[in-house]
Amino acid sequence: MSSAPAAASAAASGAPTAAARPDAGAEAPADAPAFTLCVGTAGTSVWFSRDLGETWDRPYSESGLYLESRVWALATHTARPGEVLAGTDSGVYRWQEAERRWTHLPSPFDADCTWALARHPRDPAVIVAGTHPAALWRTDDDGASWRRLEVALAERCIFVGRPRVTQVLFDPTDAETLWAGVEIDAVHRSRDGGATWQRLDQGLLSGDIHGLAVVRNGATTVFATTNKGLHRSDDGGETWRFQALDSPWQYTRTIVARADGDDTLFLTNGNGPPGSTGRLLRSLDHGNTWHDVGLPGTLNSTPWCVASHPAAPTIVFTVTNLGQLFRSLDGGTTWTKLAREFGEVRSLALLPQASMAGA
């Protein structure tokens, strides 16, 4: 077998005709860089598309990551175009698009599953990882060394056995403030870069935290998604209140701002994990009100992830837990279902292939 990174081509077949596609005739912005779309799966590693989701390939194991890895998290950074980090069932890996190779970043938690990754907004060498079993780790030297952060997280849970960190965030206003969501152990906040932590659960209907978002609109609002619905805090996480959705279901998973700011937010909503149907909701007023974007066709499960990038924020992707992929070229107003479907999907990322100087 060749040692050069090989790829199993997976060209999409049976694509809708142009007339049937909601974005027929639509194009990515003329000044947008060439993008690579990355889909992290639970059992078939990471798939890549370099034409906005029309065709796909998956590097073989000789590229550095086992072909049947479970990939729970993907993380990019605007200062590192062409690079994505993957949190897997065997530690953290770095993909370099120019080389088409994965490099393992050895860590003390390689034997655990890395469920969450966050990169410092101004320094891509600073990375925080969250694992299953629940623990938090930090590197300040791009993964050369890691230290475990001192935070008291639940060790057992009646529902999931051993809790896991589902999301880590650097606060966009103050990067010394870190947020971590734990399934099932509420929200945790550090104001000193991870040295000390506080558990925040007052007002939460459930400690089953799926996703977090910090939204700025003059004041700051923190959102948390749970199995029992969307919650918001207007006092830095000290207290929470349930925000009911006009939806048949209150189960929520991902909440994320579109990459051009906090005015537009996306929220994934469905009837459970993996569920059998769901909706992608959008807010145009910092999360105060929500409406269904109307993903086309019949959904096979709850929408799970959303991805956009500041280099071209009107290009947005979402994917269901069981692998249906959708694309918008107008910032989330209209959507096309893409032909390619995956198995179970856990992460999604969009990265430019070329330099983003000045972006």
Image: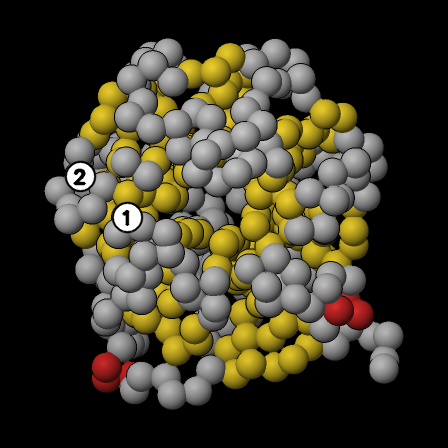
> Residue 314 occupies which quadrant of the picture?
bottom left
- Label 2: few (<14), some (14–19) or many (≥20) C-alpha neighbours in 10 Å: some
Q: Are marks 2 and 1 in contact (CB under 8 Å)?
A: yes
Query: Regarding mark 1 in the picture, which secondary structure is present there?
Result: strand
Residue 26 in picture, x, y percent from top left: 31, 70
Residue at left offset 82%, top offset 32%: 145
Q: Answer with left or right where residue 58 lies relative to residue 276.
A: right
Residue 282 in picture, x, y percent from top left: 25, 46
Q: Answer with left or right where residue 257 lies relative to residue 134.
A: left
Residue at left offset 55%, top offset 75%: 56
- Label 1: few (<14), some (14–19) or many (≥20) C-alpha neighbours in 10 Å: many
Q: Nearer the viewer, residue 125 or 12?
A: 12
What colour scheme does the image use?
secondary structure
| Residue that mark 2 sits on | 245
Residue 56 higher or lower than 290, as above or below: below
Residue type, mark 2 in image: Leu
Residue at left offset 79%, top offset 39%: 107
Q: Nearer the viewer, residue 34 or 268?
A: 268
Query: Regarding mark 2 in the picture, which secondary structure is present there?
Result: loop
- Mark 2 and mark 1 lie on one chain; the one further toward the N terminus is 2
Residue 45 in picture, x, y percent from top left: 62, 63
Residue type, mark 1 in image: Asn
Q: Is residue 216 visible?
A: no
| Residue that mark 1 sits on | 269
Residue at left offset 85%, top offset 82%: 1
> Residue 279 occupies which quadrant of the picture?
bottom left
Q: Is residue 147 visible?
A: yes
Residue 101 higher or lower than 77, as above or below: below
Residue 139 in picture, x, y percent from top left: 74, 30
